[in-house]
Image: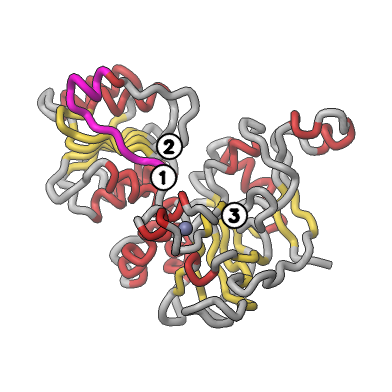
């Protein structure tokens, strides 16, 4: 018997010709299966026993068969305990409680040294291409010494551990939107998107000292978290109406920083419609059918940054604020299951019954 792990729903095209499998593994298929025990394969590996994992909005692309995913491990957000460790892993020991950023990286290549571990020449993401996923009982972590971040201290509360879990991806991704858009003390910010990333971007903007944060959100439960995270204004409009409302709220000027946390053509257009001249759109929503309006970039001096969050770089910066209770990003985790409950955890997010699903796998 091996460690159990979530199996991904797969792109039906990947299985064409295997009719039985097609029926079993079509869109919205996710199940728990047995996998071989992860082992230290090379001296820079560690094996981490997963304590908490969660389901990412990006996992839903696979779930919906919008993006291909082979049958196998899935999930890239987890915290856990080092169970076994290779001889060349520096700075960690068995028994350490660690946060895994959603990608592993060697820490030594030119891109890692420049602060961009998601572009590591030797890196990759958990839960893809045969690499163990976080939605399972254990994970082999490549380049463990460079990838994992040890959590100091012990006896952390359940609430703290949930918030530490969000540093694996969603909080660092929201932070990246804010940093990319240049949020600074006194900034007037708008956050487009009220998913877990958008809500995290509100919290990150407040943490960076924004004076005013306009959240675009319609759902009451999400509005409540948005306010708790620091939103000062909430508007329910979308598209052109949203642009008009934000312009109205800012005396026709627009915002100093527009944070794009959705990834659709309409949301990108909204961001560029509300960004004041000289500001930057900070985009972290994975794009599906999006165009960047180059005319606006050039003729209104609106910059464009963003991308895949360098979470490994941000975790040490954000972790003290979680440990000392200044921020509570775990509030986005409004649904909880165990590993056997994975199918409904995905369904709950797919159907927007949950903002973000926590998967409780083990205990500290
Ligand atoms: Zn690297």
Q: Is residue 61 above or below residue 116?
A: above
| Residue drawn at x 49%, y 27% as measured from the top left | 288
Quick one: which residue is furthest to the left in this view?
Answer: 251
Residue closest to the eye, 309 or 246: 309
Q: Identify the residue at horizontal 78%, vertical 60% (top origin).
A: 35
The tag earlier along the polypeptide, 2 or 3, is 3
Closer mark to the observer between disc 1 and disc 3 = 3
Q: Which residue is mark 2?
A: 285
The residue labelled by disc 1 is 197
Residue 126 is labelled as: 3
| 123 or 178, nearer to the observer | 123
Please tell me how crowded label 2 is: few (under 14), some (14-19), or many (20+) other residues with Cα within 10 Å: many
**Magenta span of residues:** 295-307
Image location (x, y in percent) of residue 164: 44, 64
Instruction: Tell me which label, 1 or 3, sits earlier in the chain.
Output: 3
Q: CA distance from mark 1 to mark 3?
A: 19 Å
The stretch drawn in magenta includes residue 305: yes
Indicate left or right for 200 with 358 as reference: left
Q: Is residue 201 magenta?
A: no
Which image quadrant is residue 76 in? bottom right
Give residue 114's quadrant in the image: bottom left
């Amino acid at each position: 018997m091996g460690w159990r792990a979530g199996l991904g729903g797969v792109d039906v095209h990947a299985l064409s010709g295997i009719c039985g499998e097609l029926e079993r593994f079509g869109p919205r298929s996710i199940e728990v299966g047995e996998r071989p025990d992860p082992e230290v394969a090379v001296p820079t590996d560690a094996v981490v026993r997963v304590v908490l994992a969660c389901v990412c909005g990006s996992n839903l692309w696979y779930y919906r068969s919008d993006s291909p995913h082979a049958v196998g491990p899935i999930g890239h957000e987890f915290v856990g305990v080092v169970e076994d460790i290779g001889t060349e892993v520096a700075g960690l020991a068995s028994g350490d409680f660690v946060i895994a950023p959603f990608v592993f990286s060697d820490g030594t290549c030119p891109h890692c040294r420049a602060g961009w571990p998601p572009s590591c020449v030797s890196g990759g993401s958990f839960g893809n291409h045969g690499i163990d996923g976080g939605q399972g009982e254990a994970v082999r972590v490549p380049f463990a010494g460079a990838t994992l971040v040890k959590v100091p201290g012990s006896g952390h509360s359940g609430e703290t551990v949930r918030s530490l879990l969000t540093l694996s991806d969603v909080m660092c991704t929201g932070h990246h939107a804010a940093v990319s858009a240049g949020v600074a003390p006194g900034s007037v910010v708008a956050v487009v998107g009220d998913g877990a990333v958008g809500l995290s971007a509100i919290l990150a903007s407040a943490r960076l000292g924004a004076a005013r944060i306009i959240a675009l959100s319609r759902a009451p439960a999400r509005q409540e978290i948005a306010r708790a995270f620091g939103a000062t204004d909430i508007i329910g409009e979308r598209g052109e109406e949203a642009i008009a409302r934000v312009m109205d709220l800012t005396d026709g000027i627009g915002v100093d920083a527009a944070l794009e946390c959705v990834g659709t053509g309409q949301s990108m257009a909204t961001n560029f419609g509300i960004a004041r001249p000289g500001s930057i759109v900070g985009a972290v929503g994975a794009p599906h059918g999006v165009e960047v309006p180059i005319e606006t970039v050039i003729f209104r001096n609106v910059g464009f940054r963003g991308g895949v969050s360098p979470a490994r770089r941000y975790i040490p910066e954000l972790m003290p604020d979680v440990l000392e209770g200044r921020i509570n990003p775990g509030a986005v985790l409004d649904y909880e299951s165990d590993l056997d409950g994975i199918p409904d955890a995905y369904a709950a997010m797919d159907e927007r019954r949950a903002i973000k699903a926590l998967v409780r796998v083990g205990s500290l």
